[in-house]
Amino acid sequence: MGESLGIGLLGLGVVGGGVLEALQANAQAYEQRCGRGLEVRAAAVRDVSSRSALAANGLSLSTDPAEVATRDDLDIIVELMGGETPASECIEAALSAGKSVVTANKEVMAKRGSALLSLAESRGVELRYEASVGGGIPIIGVLQRELQANEVSSVRAIINGTTNYMITAMSRDGLSYADALGDAQRLGYAEADPTNDVDGIDAAYKLAILASLAFHAEVAPNDVYREGIRSLAARDFVHARDLGYAIRMLATARRTPTGLDLRVHPTLVPLEDPMAGVEGVLNAVSVSGDLIGSVMLEGAGAGSGATSSAVVADILDVAGRMASSQEPRQQRRLESSPLLASLEDICVRTYLRLEVPDRAGVLAELGAVFAAESVSIASVLQTPHPEHSRSADLIVTTHACTDGAIDRVLDKLAHSSSLIELGVRLRIEDGRDDQ
Ligand SMILES: NC(=O)c1ccc[n+]([C@@H]2O[C@H](COP(=O)([O-])OP(=O)(O)OC[C@H]3O[C@@H](n4cnc5c(N)ncnc54)[C@H](OP(=O)(O)O)[C@@H]3O)[C@@H](O)[C@H]2O)c1
């Protein structure tokens, strides 16, 4: 076996700590698997003082990740700091210095992945990012390699464990949004500022990465339409279940005749849909292609062990190629600025919870507004409003119509006396809305 490869870890937190542990605990097995020893020589953290034991064991610690990223004695840089800056600059510096990089950073890969992958290619090195989507679920490699014979038609995914945990708690235990969030924060599943998760920003980053791979296109996070889960109430889960649906924060990327349809929002899925069975912090990704039909992967989308599994696999693969002097894997060329379908033309079924005055004639007035936009109502349920005695909750589901038609209905209702407030608008995905 040749000389050991030098590894630099940028970050020793939940994932970085797990990766260090795995590399140290399994050093012999990994050396046999990839043909060279893997020696973690340096790491960057913000707080060096609390890590004296690591330093005593010969690990060089620095608070300057850019310095670690370009050290001469390192061959592979593993970026596990998170966030856009300075992670993005460090990855760029490492690639420019001729080092292969492994990262779990969805924000950087979603925003700058294409440029960084080109840089890696031009320098003859690799940039791997399996852990950036779905934690331990091996979906990046599956899209890049195992499914490459397919023309992918759609990707459907639950790729944010925080919101899936909250949604499951609201559905199973009848918790309010605020209580579900509080629980998630207590258990360490949600950050103090949960914006990235509950507003779908994190899922949009991940969907942009998956869609780029599935459709060989440069999909940017801003290409993804997103809505969060803040307006969901526990009673929506009860109504949805009565109608035969579960609610899931679904990330969907579809090829349509008018372009890519890219969306992250809470969605009603049939109770028998495998996505409805994905509970708690689990993630799942389902890919449909012309040859494979459909394939679904489900597993731990976060956590030290699961995420380290994906990061270390990337390290071993890159190291193995280096050890056997193989060329770096080439990435497929991407179509820049893909054509995007316009959301208002997308045909969907819709679930609405409307707060309406509890008086005679309201249903007829509402019905007329829907009819004027040619929106056909599939079901209506009226229940007392839980807080306002003079209001009622009206749960309306529609047959498939354009999203734009629902916009116009809601716009008209907003100016009428028959609507007090739009509680929630959710799209239904049950296969009965194909264009
Ligand atoms: N946690 C998961 O389950 C999970 C799952 C999938 C993907 N990921 C991704 O993995 C990456 C790491 O996540 P994590 O949960 O491990 O984060 P984390 O626990 O917050 O750890 C971040 C680490 O980076 C270090 N760090 C941050 N900024 C730094 C800077 N400017 N200079 C030097 N060191 C810096 C921190 O140092 P200190 O320790 O000294 O503060 C810490 O060791 C992120 O991109 C995340 O999205 C995480």
Image: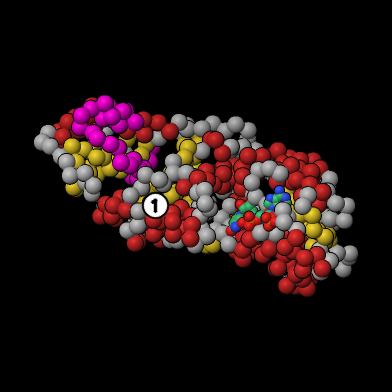
Rendered-image quadrant of the N terminus: bottom right
Question: Residue at horizontal 32%, vertical 53%?
Answer: 234
In this rendering, the answer to whether 224 lies above or below 315 is above
> In the drawing, does residue 37 fall left or right of residue 107?
right
Quadrant assignment for ligand 1:
bottom right
Mark 1 = which residue?
Answer: 178
Rendered-image quadrant of the C terminus: top left
Is residue 134 a member of the stretch shown in magenta? no
| Residue stretch rendered in magenta on the structure | 407-435
Question: Residue at horizontal 70%, vertical 68%?
Answer: 22
> In the drawing, does residue 287 fall left or right of residue 238?
right
Q: Is residue 17 visible?
A: yes
Question: Which residue reaches farthest front?
Answer: 49
Q: Position of residue 414 (x, y in %)?
A: 28, 29
Q: Position of residue 237 (x, y in %)?
A: 32, 53
Viewer-proximal residue among 220 and 153: 220
Q: Position of residue 59 (x, y in %)?
A: 81, 63
Q: Position of residue 85 (x, y in %)?
A: 68, 42
User: Colour mode?
Assistant: secondary structure
> In the drawing, does residue 16 fall left or right of residue 38?
left
Question: Residue at horizontal 47%, vertical 32%?
Answer: 341
Q: Is mark 1 within 8 Å of ligand 1?
A: no
Is residue 427 a member of the stretch shown in magenta? yes
Viewer-proximal residue among 180 and 376: 180
Give SS at disc 1.
helix
Amino acid bearing label 1: Ala
Question: Which residue reaches farthest left?
Answer: 360
